Image (cartoon, grey):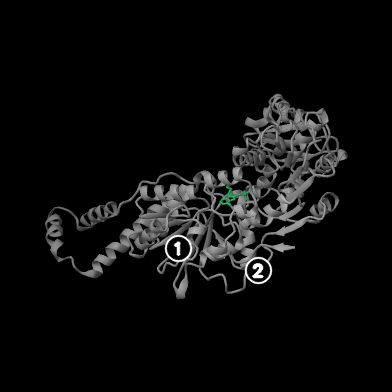
Amino acid sequence: MTSIDEPPPAIDDAVSFADLGLRPELLGVLAGLGYEEPTPIQREAIPQLIEGRDLLGQAATGTGKTAAFALPLLQRLTAGSRPKHPTALVLVPTRELAVQVSEAVHRYGRDLGARVLPIYGGQPIGRQLAALDRGVDVVVATPGRALDHMGRGTLPLDRLEVVVLDEADEMLDMGFAEDIEAILSSTPPGRQTVLFSATMPARIDGIARRHLRNPVRIHMGRSQVDAGQAPLVRQVAYVVPRAFKMATLGRILDVESPTAALVFCRTRDEVDQIAGTLNGRGYRAEALHGGMTQEQRDRVMGRLRAGTADLLIATDVAARGLDVEHLTHVVNYEVPSAPDSYVHRIGRVGRAGREGVAITLVEPREHRMLKTIERVTRQRITVEKVPTVADLRSRRLELTRAALEESILEDELEGFRVVVESLADKFDVMLVALAAVKLAHEASGVVADDDEIPQITAGTDRPARPAGAARPPRPARGPSAGMTKLFVGAGRSAGIRPQDIVGAIAGETRLGGRDIGAIEIADRFTLVEVPEAAADEVVAALKASTVKGKKATIRRAHEDR
Ligand code: AMP
């Protein structure tokens, strides 16, 4: 078992994407995307996959696992004319992931002219058929829809060289085990098989034993960081959807008001973009990344040391070896790609007994990575609520109050007495004080920030119920507000479990597990609540698909039930 939690390499022995043996068309795209170096999982997996080995990888979202499997499969595509039938099939649990992964493969394969097709339910099958008929290189599919196409003879697998199972544990939790077995059994025996899973329950091991040949095993977060190696600083995380990350960063910095902070990002583009936005918000932010000359970097560091800049926005590569004395905060704008990198980053604050704060922004789908980091560092990261507009206002008032208190203690106020005395003839002294506080507050350069940021609890991106756990039965009654009950003509006697229903719906429509309401499983049928607005889509999608591999009647449930 390979463990990939070794300390990050020093600059001169850092591994580059070129060292991994990737072809120039891929290297060019990666440079264009601002990726500076492979993540640990990419460092381990890519050379082995290029060699043709099967792979069993335990890695969560946020580690860079998508590129780890996508780049090697793109590496196989020949330049010029290619077979019409797909070379690679990637199976994913949800429609959302199918879109995301196919966008990523498309992005990485741009200079190779890779033809990528996402296949999932809820999309007119005609469009998928036309694309398959024109020819595709990589198909990214949910298992149900892939089987559907195989049944129709529209997804030819005879030229398949690679099969990837992404988020395999999630696919099993959604009831896709039989579908996956059926698909794998229909692929050429000589194919390469890659399996990524955030957890490794026994059922995953079973699939690996049956379908992978002597796989390389990669395990993220296996080793433990020595106690004491992770610094004792206040560690907090905020769970925020991607679209609100920038607003959240601004809000947190305003509330924390750091003396000097280092903000880590994944790519060069992000560094530039965030530095620009924060400057617009009134911060003195400097960008630092590997695309800058030594002279430019020295200038930036000089400004930070001299205190003429208070925020440094950097990639890991650029920040390596960097020593800033007075840092009070480290912010991970992106979850680091390995626990070790987290420890390394936050080790820059809290030095020499000084207080420090480490803040991590986590996208809902990356919550598992946070758990891995906690386990490896054996330290707790407290998930906090994103400060609200009201929190920010009270924090700003607090800062103004502190500034006024400081001014009182400085005792250089005599020159202003005449102003207060003359106003006190006309107004109450309290009113005079209030007006002075208002002016001081406004003069502190307050930026308008009135947008509320949605509050998310960690881990809620996954289906609301623990997979496999049946929802407690509810008494039969009308649907909840905004929900519609659907009738599915298969129930307990057909072996239907709640996760089969969740899997069928989440795999074929834009709904996630969280959107699905009560599920009542009777002997011969099932009633499931879905949002009214999506009811027709769910009916259409499930009509065109299967539940647990079988066709089932589906319609709106009768009102009188
Ligand atoms: P994943 O774990 O595959 O969901 O990837 C997480 C994120 O990291 C995605 O937004 C990728 O675009 C990004 N990413 C993947 N590899 C790298 C890399 N080597 N450098 C910078 N960003 C990366």
The amino acid beneath tag 1 is His
Circle number at residue 104: none
Q: Nearer the viewer, residue 180 or 185?
A: 185
User: Which picture quadrant has residue 187?
Assistant: top right
The amino acid beneath tag 2 is Gln
**Element marked by disc 1:** strand
Mark 1 and mark 2: Cα distance apart in space: 24 Å
* Badge 1 residue CB within 8 Å of ligand 1: no
Q: Residue at x 79, y 32 (%)?
A: 156
Q: Is residue 469 left or right of residue 220?
A: right
Q: From the image, which quarter does the N terminus lie in? A: bottom right
Mark 1 closeness class: few <14, some 14–19, many ≥20 residues within 10 Å: many
For marks 1 and 2, the one nearer the N-term is 2
Residue 487 on image: x %, y %: 76, 31
Mark 2 = which residue?
224
Q: Nearer the viewer, residue 305 or 354?
A: 305
Q: Residue at x 73, y 38 (%)?
A: 142
**Element marked by disc 2:** loop
Q: Is residue 125 visible?
A: yes
Q: Nearer the viewer, residue 538 or 367?
A: 367
Q: Nearer the viewer, residue 410 or 436?
A: 410
Q: Residue at x 81, y 31 (%)?
A: 552
Q: Is residue 546 visible?
A: no
Q: Is residue 493 left or right of residue 308?
A: right
In this rendering, the label closer to the viewer, 1 or 2:
2
User: Which picture quadrant has residue 499?
Assistant: top right
Residue 440 on image: x %, y %: 26, 55
Q: How many marks?
A: 2
Residue 184 on image: x %, y %: 82, 42
Q: Residue at x 44, y 67 (%)?
A: 323
Q: Does residue 489 lie above or below 438 as drawn? A: above
Mark 1 = which residue?
329
